[in-house]
Image (cartoon, rainbow, N blue to C red):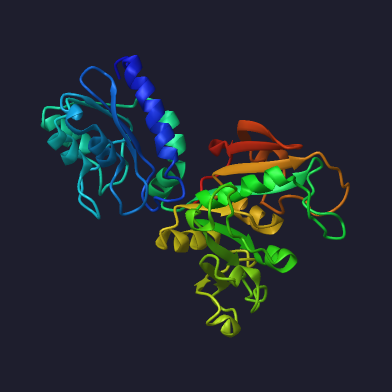
């Protein structure tokens, strides 16, 4: 692409910031931000996709801009859509508003929505794509993964001591991480469509798995679908905190499990067992969640479930909270992931580090070429 005008680059950075406001509220749609500049390059209107089924970012920004949009430039994080769903096509809205130029960051890979750029160009509008594409794609990583891979984006979160223990030898684990780290986990939950734990965590911790965000009322926080992977249907009992009604719950059990006692407690999904016979098929679990409009999943399960997801190549991002604590014994953060020698190690690219109270938060993404791709 040609070198963008500084005002357009600044507008795109602002649009990316606006898009992030929709995290946790727009699924199964993407997060999108838009800034409309008038013909003199001044900001005339801003908007973001606020909720699924509601007006798209471009519509909000055009409404704010009014007549100042005519002859101006729309700067948007995702290629404007060209289809009619619960809302009309944004490409037509931009044409009707009389904008002269549209600059977008990421091309829309969704087959049912693409074509917006072509429609705009055919209407005589100057169109340019690719501005700050990597930054905008990072903000939409969950939705893009879901569209391109046909399964939810998976973020594995864990908290451990500096020597990699998630609990002491006697099983106690509260609290390894700091209040600041635990608050950050609630932020991750609120941004996810689902949070997943395994039977071991369900038995040991009786987790509630709801999201609580400081400064926000409970009804202003999006609650994720709570998913318990309970292969033998033996971990979740009546009265479990995960059944408290705070958020919807789904229990995944094996096809051959006796789950009669769970009927009426929570919706069940029956899945095939993993090929090796232990646990459930991770690809089947992710397909079942995708079918329920889950586009992003926060994996909070213990070491066994984490190992199964890693072995399946189904972890897209890792967030580790490392506490300045040493235990010397106790369960490690991850179990068997199918790695038997150092040459098979899953290498990670560290993308961010931050101090949260006394803890260190490390964010990293798998380097895909070092592991087989998932099926």
Quadrant housing the N terminus: top left
Whether 26 is drawn above or below 352: the answer is below
Residue 239 image point, x, y percent: 65, 77
- Comparing 217 with 276, the one in front is 217
| Residue 262 seen in the current view | yes
From the viewer's perspective, is 165 left or right of 193? right
Residue 144 image point, x, y percent: 40, 43
- Which residue: 83% across, 60% down? 171
Residue 292 image point, x, y percent: 42, 63
Residue 330 image point, x, y percent: 84, 54
Q: Residue reaching furthest left?
A: 123
From the viewer's perspective, is 347 left or right of 21? right
- Comparing 105 with 1, the one in front is 105
- Comparing 224 with 349, the one in front is 224
Whether 132 is drawn above or below 81: the answer is above
- Which residue: 87% across, 56% down? 169
Whether 49 is drawn above or below 272: the answer is above
């Amino acid at each position: 692409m040609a070198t963008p005008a500084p005002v357009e680059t600044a507008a795109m950075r602002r649009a990316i910031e606006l898009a992030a406001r929709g995290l946790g509220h727009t699924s199964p749609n993407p997060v999108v931000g838009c800034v409309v500049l008038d013909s003199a390059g001044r900001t005339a209107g801003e908007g973001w996709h606020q909720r699924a089924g509601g007006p798209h970012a471009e519509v909000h920004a055009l409404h704010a801009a009014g007549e100042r949009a005519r002859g101006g430039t729309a700067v948007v994080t995702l290629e404007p859509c060209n289809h009619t769903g619960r809302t009309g096509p944004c490409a037509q809205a931009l044409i009707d508003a009389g904008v002269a130029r549209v600059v977008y960051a990421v091309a829309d890979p969704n087959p049912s929505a693409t074509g917006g750029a072509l429609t705009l160009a055919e209407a005589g509008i100057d169109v340019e794509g690719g501005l700050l594409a990597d930054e905008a794609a990072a903000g939409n990583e969950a939705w893009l993964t879901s569209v391109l891979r046909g399964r939810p984006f998976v973020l594995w979160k864990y908290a451990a001591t500096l020597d990699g223990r998630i609990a002491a030898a006697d099983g106690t684990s509260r609290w390894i991480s700091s209040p600041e780290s635990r608050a950050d986990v609630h932020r991750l939950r609120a941004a996810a469509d689902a949070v997943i734990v395994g039977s071991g965590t369900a038995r040991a911790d009786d987790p509630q798995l709801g999201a609580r965000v400081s400064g926000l009322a409970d009804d202003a926080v999006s609650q994720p679908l709570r998913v318990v992977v309970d292969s033998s249907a033996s971990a979740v009992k009546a009265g479990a905190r995960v059944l408290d009604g705070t958020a919807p719950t789904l229990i995944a059990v094996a096809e051959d499990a006796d789950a009669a006692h769970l009927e009426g407690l929570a919706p069940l999904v029956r899945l095939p067992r993993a090929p090796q016979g232990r646990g459930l098929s991770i690809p089947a679990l992710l397909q079942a969640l995708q079918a329920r409009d889950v586009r992003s999943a926060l994996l909070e399960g213990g070491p066994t479930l984490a190992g199964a997801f890693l072995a399946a190549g189904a972890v897209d991002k890792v967030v580790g909270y490392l506490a300045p604590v040493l235990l010397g014994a106790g369960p490690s953060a991850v179990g068997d992931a199918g790695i038997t020698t150092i040459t098979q190690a899953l290498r990670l690219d560290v993308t961010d580090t931050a101090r949260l109270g006394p803890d260190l938060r490390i964010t990293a993404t798998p380097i895909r070429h070092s592991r087989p791709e998932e099926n």
